[in-house]
Amino acid sequence: FGLNLDGCPPPNAWLGIGKSVCGPNAFLTSLEAILGIPFTEVNPLERTIAYRDCINETLSADQPHAASFELDPLATAQLLLNWRDELTEAGWSHSSNHDDVSPRLKALSTIEASFQRTDFSTSCTASRIASIIREIKLCPQAFKGEILVIDTPDSLPRRWAQLFQLLAADYGDFSSTE
């Protein structure tokens, strides 16, 4: 597994019978299939439009993204949604205390409260990982296999690190491709 391996052809040395080289999307899809977790592909544009609507619903002139949103609502929504997804993957929660945080994070928290009421809030990597972790904890014997991770543990977002810890993944030096 590697965070940047989706869609990349692996070196020949990594290939073989019983081996799978994959990135985040392929890895999560495989685990969901093994564990019987249904996954519904969500149209990214529909998700961005839903986020744009939530921004519009919660928008005030003093928010850091207000001017950008006025100029290009869809591009602003896409950027903020990407930030939201990355923060969620890193372990951020909109329900945390946001008294001593930046105005951007406060604004994202306000938007998130609205976004949580949509069907699109759970269609992100962090939610998929959370579902997988729940299933593995319920039935630890459901997944038996060896996982080698090419990323260092400290370079992984928090949710990924939690998943790999639960799966007892090994971390290796794969800098050599021969």
Image: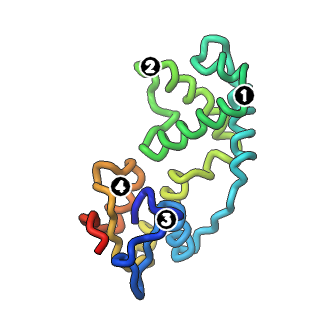
Per the image, the residue denoted by label 1 is 73
Q: Within the image, what quadrant is residue 169 found in? A: bottom left
Q: Residue 161's mark?
A: 4
Going from the N terminus, do you reach mark 3 or mark 2 first? 3
Mark 2 near mark 4, Cβ–Cβ under 8 Å?
A: no
Residue drawn 62% across the image and 30% down it: 111
User: In the depicted view, which residue is nearer to us: 55 or 152?
Assistant: 152
Percent across and percent down for residue 120 are: 68, 47
Percent across and percent down for residue 107 are: 57, 24
Could you give the CA–CA distance between mark 3 and mark 2, rounded to whole angstroms? Answer: 42 Å
Compared with 68, 18 (above or below) is: below
Quadrant, the C terminus: bottom left
Could you give the CA–CA distance between mark 1 and mark 4, rounded to whole angstroms? Answer: 34 Å
Going from the N terminus, do you reach mark 1 or mark 4 first? 1
Looking at the picture, which amino acid does disc 2 mark?
A: Asp
| Residue at the extreme front | 178
Per the image, the residue denoted by label 2 is 99
**Mark 1 Cα shell of 10 Å, populated few (<14), some (14-19), many (≥20):** many
Name the element at disc 1: helix
